[in-house]
Structures are given as C-alpha cells and as structure tokens.
Image (cartoon, rainbow, N blue to C red):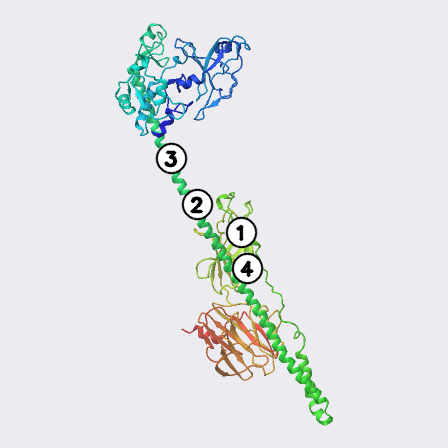
Amino acid sequence: MEEMEEELKCPVCGSFYREPIILPCSHNLCQACARNILVQTPESESPQSRRASGSAVSDYDYLDLDKMSLYSEADSGYGSYGGFASAPTTPCQKSPNGVRVFPPAAPPPPAALAPPPPPRNACLTCPQCHRSLVLDERGLRGFPRNRLLEGVIDRYQQGRAAALRCQLCEKAPKEAAVMCEQCDVFYCDPCRLRCHPPRGPLAKHRLVPPAQGRVSRRLSPRKISTCTDHELENHSMYCVQCKSPVCYQCLEEGKHSSHEVKALGAMWKLHKSQLSQALNGLSDRAKEAKEFLVQLRNMVQQIQENSVEFEACLVAQCDALIDALNRRKAQLLSRVNKEHEHKLKVVRDQISHCTVKLRQTTGLMEYCLEVIKENDPSGFLQISDALIRRVHLTEDQWGKGTLTPRMTTDFDLNLDNAPLLQSIHQLDFVQMKVSSPVPAPPILQLEECCTHNNSATLSWKQPPLSTVQVEGYILELDDGNGGQFREVYVGKETMCTVDGLHFNSTYSARVKAFNKTGVSPYSKTLVLQTSEGCNFETQGTPYSQLVDIKKMVAVAWFSFDPASAHADIIFSNDNLTVTCNSYDDRVVLGKTGFSKGLHYWELSIDRYDNHPDPAFGVARIDVLKDAMLGKDDKAWAMYVDNNRSWFMHNNSHTNRTEGGITKGATVGVLLDLTRRTLTFSINEDQQGPVAFENLEGLFFPAVSLNRNVQVTLHTGLPVPEFYASRSAMP
C-alpha cells in the first residue's frame, strides 16, 4: 500500500487528490491545482491562429512533446493541432514533489498604461507529460471528474491508522473536527468557520464527527457519475471512438450519433477484464523483478565472499613465495658461510704450516751461525757438508708457490637475481593477460646427442615453421629406475649436458618449450645407446613423448680433478699424472663418481724413495684433502710402504699384508657396487681378502701422496682375471 501512495498524490500540490479531474493525456490533477496553473493567452496566439501563421513553438524548455487541444475535430470535443499556443515568458515553478508547473497568470497592467486587452483563451499544461491543452468555453468543467480515484483515496485513507485530516487546509492539514455529510468534506474548526458557516443553505447540512463520517462514507451507496455536458444526465453508454462514457442526451444531440457506442456495464466489465489481464502480465514481471533482485543481492553476498576468499588465497600465495625466498636466502647464506669458513681454514692452515717451517728455518739459521763462529777447522769440516745440504734443502722447501697465498680474499660468488626479479615484475593474473599460442614441441637433434662416462648431452630445436615465440625450455630426467621425473635444466639454451648419471643405467628424459601463455607438449622419444659408438632411434608414446637414454658403458674413462684437489697437488699429462710439492700427505680425487656397476682402474708408481706411505682407494666428495686417505670416515683406502700394506677407514688399520711397492709398481683398485665391495691389488696380485664391504652411495677414485711420490692414472681397463673368474663362480 505504501508504494501506491505516490499514485494518489497530485503532482502540483503533492497532497492527496481533492476533486481530481482527468486530463485528455490520462493524467490527473486537483481541480484547484488545475485552476492555479491555468495560463491566459491572447486570441491572436490561439492554436488556430498559430496554425495559420506557422509561428514557432513555445519558449518553455520542457514543452517539447506532442501538444494536445480540446478543440474537436470529430464531434468528440477533443482533437489535436500542429502548433502550440505560446505561454507567457514567466519562469516556471516547481511543485512540492518536484514537477514543474506554470505560475498563475500575472495581473494585467493598469488601464491607463496598457491598451485594451484582447480576448484571451485559457491554456493548461500537464505537469507530468508537459502536453499543452487549450480549454474551450466550458473551461475546467470540460474535464471529467475522476470519482474512481476519489474512492481509492478514501479507502486508502480509511485503511491508514493516522487521524483524519482537514481537506481544506492549504499547508499542513490539521486534524479534522467534523465532516459534512452533504458536502462530503472533512473540516477543521478554522476551515469550518471560514468555508462552511452555519447560515444560509449550509445551515441545513448535517455535521458529524470524523469517525462517524468515515463510517457513513464507507456505507453510503456508490455515486453515479454525471455527464460533463449534461449535468443532470447520468452516464449510460460508452463511446468506443472517443473512449469516454456518454449519456442519452449526448447521443440524441448528435455529437456521438455516428460513433460506435456500447453499454456502460458491458464495457466496464470488459475493461476490468483487460486491466486484470494486463495486471497479470505486470505481476509476472514484478515477480521476476523480485527474484532478480534476490539474485542480485545473493550475487553481492557471493562477490563479497569470493573477494575475501580470493584475497586470502592471494595473500597465501604471496606468503608462500616469500617463504620460499626466505628459505633460499638461508641456503645461500649457508653457502656463503661455508665459503667463509673454508677460506679461513685454508689461510689458517697455511699460516700454521708456514709458521712451523719458519721456526725450523730460523733454528737452522741460528745453529749455522753458531757453527760458523767455531774456530776448530777439523770439527767444522766434519759437519759442514751436512749443514750445507740441509740449508739447500730448506731453501728448496721455500721454493715457488710456498710463499703464495693458497686462497684469495674475494668471494667468487655472484648472485644471479635478474631472472627472479623479472619473474616478480611479470607476476600477474592469468585472465588479465593477452592470450597467445602455446609453443610447438621441440625437435631433438639426434646427430648432436651423445653420452660420455656418467654424463649425457642432449640437443633440441624448435620446428622450422613455428612462429610462436619461445621464452625457454624445460629438460626433465627420471632417476634411472623408472621413477618420477625431475627438472634438470630450465633456460633458453637448446643444449644441455647432465653429469652425475649412474653407469649401466637406463634414463628417460623429456624436453618441452614454454612462454607466457603455457607449456608445449613433450618432444618425441629418443633411445640413445652408447658403447663403442652411438646409435639413435626415435619412438612415440601415447601419454607423453620421452627421451630414453640407455647407458651401456662397459668401462669408465676419467682423469684427476684439479678443481677438488688440494692446492699442493701438481698435475701433468692431461691431469693423469700427479705429485705434490709438500712433505705432508695431500688428497686428489678423480673427476667421475660411481654409484652403480663394476669399475676398475690402476695407478702406476712413477717415483718413490721408500720413505713415504701413499694411499689409494675411494672417497666421498667432501673428504679431508690435507690428511692421509683413510684418516676420516669419508675414505676407504689401502696405504703401502716398500714392504707392507694396510687397509684403513676412519683412522682404523686392518688386515696388514706382506708386499709393498717400488718404483714401477702398479696398484689396482676394483670397486664393485653391485656386491658393494672394494678390492686392491699390487702388480695384479690381490692384497688380502675383500678390503671393504657394504659400500653404498657415491664414490670417487682417490689418492693421497707427498712430494716423494708421483703416480699416473690408467682408466678404461677390463676387470682383472682374478676377480673375473671369481665373479663367474655360482
């Protein structure tokens, strides 16, 4: 009911309609309000004269719609005309509900100053649709009274709990004191004394309390509307062409004689039915609108919930990136700390070593000076040769490289953060990016793929006709046992060498391209077999396209590794021959590590003066480099002299055997990771039983020696006969 209240209020005064009249445009006005907004126009500016003169339309900015007239063109009293009577140039006003209306006509100028006024016509503009209406000689009486609207307003006011208000108060209506049954109007006391004095014909009117008047109004019979042209005649027929009720006198006088008329009650029922049907459709639209509003309100709630959830997800993703960066930061700091400790240790070891040598040298110098002071020639000559040799030997110990720092003060670490910064700057939502095609799968270049020892080199390229931009490639490799794939290379290069593979193992590799849009499918399958040569074969798989690297290497070829060796180690012969410039034992490792298979290599003794005890065996990558091999738990070794040999691990000696080494001897090392054993031989004679058992992990060939020993490495050798015959036994 509250939504209907705006339909019951006058657009001019903003109050409920009082004596509403129906305009030809179907809008309503209070009769008093219509009288207030009438505008008087001279006859020379009437619609007929404007049609004849063809003058312009009104200056009013809001009178721009089709204009209507009350002058009949077809016996109905209503019609339309092309022009609009110009209104006075007085500015328009606004009603309480915001509708613009005409002001009342200004008073005429004094007769002495103005010429005789020409005949005038009345013009009315609808405040809602702004259509202009020119009244005929009947004036406002030519508009029918909307008694139906009055009844709706009465029922609406009766349904409200508020007290009845006076209907004649101009501004704030006061509470009604009485109601006149004959006038059917509620009065407050001031309005009753002013508008309904108890004298003359009004003295016979019956005044009742407002509540009783409301009841009597509700119980009073429905008033029958009368004809506007014939006030004594009731409406009895309906003119279909004019769409208005008419009386019998209207039909007899001929105004509607040629029009189609129908019974008033029948048309009343028909129009009620049509209005009901129209209301059904409007009700369906209103129901759909309510459901749509519910849907929109649910969308608002869902958007808020999704926004909170998405923000939480975004924060969690960014926090995960920050955590990953912090973890990587900790790892990098750990590496820096290790490098720092390593540098300090090397420098401190060199300080300690140099201090001991300097102390020995200083003592020898002081002793020699004291000997020079002696005056006994025969005694001096007895020890001079030995002292001279010691001085020269000590001087040789301070030879080239001894007084050179073994470690630089600079940290050879350069953090490459450019790709990460670029990725951070490119971090964005996927749906906001412009989509572009996904790259095509790369093509493996068979002629450039190869293997060497425990490393494999793979090469690929994009298809020749591919025009999609590629930002990089991803190479993945399994664990050699058919396990899960892991990324071994991500970058822009089209060739990659993978080190640290197991010998005699089969690997599956795959490569794919990527750009900002996505990742391409994997490349085609490649089976790579290497023994003495390389054979290549491509295959296809239904799930993804793989690269199978079948490593069938019978023997391993490798050399000593200068990068991991002690600084005192001296390399020659393409890193196959090593010696040392120190009297202390120093360790050097081979370049290749072993975790599977059977491997054998030999070391020939090029120089040996019967005093030092070199050691041969295997070690972890982080073994001590400045102590004899086997002194810590990172190495498994056999150390020998000219008569005997011992097996040593974690500074524990076991299995002393007879048989040493001399210049020209050959020491063999046999690592069987299938049986997880380590065996030694000298000149092809096995030294004792199996030296070490239960070996597991990654092992590197290793040697420890000093300046009195020089050895040469021989690799790619077959398994010796003594072990091959034993392996063939069931």
Can you name the residue that lies furthest to the top here? 253
Task: Identify whether 301 is placed above or below 118.
Answer: below
Q: Which residue is mark 3?
A: 292
In this view of the protein, which residue sits in the foreground, 567 or 297? 297
Circle 3 — which element? helix
Structural distance between the alpha carbons of marks 2 and 1: 23 Å
- Of pointers 2 and 1, the one earlier in the residue sequence: 2
Q: Residue 416: x, y in percent?
A: 57, 57
Percent position of residue 575, x then y: 60, 70
Give the vertical position of 97 relative to 107 (above or below).
below
Q: Nearer the viewer's eye, disc 4 or disc 3?
A: 3
Q: Disc 2 residue type?
A: Ser
* Mark nearer the N terminus (2 vs 4): 2
Real-space CA distance between mark 2 and mark 4, rounded to the nearest whole angstrom: 47 Å
Residue bearing mark 2: 307
Element carrying mark 4:
strand
Circles 2 and 1: CB distance less than 8 Å?
Answer: no
Residue 424: give its label.
1
Which tag is nearer the camera, tag 4 or tag 1? 1
Query: Could you tell me how far apart the alpha carbons at marks 1 and 3 are, in whole angstroms?
Result: 42 Å
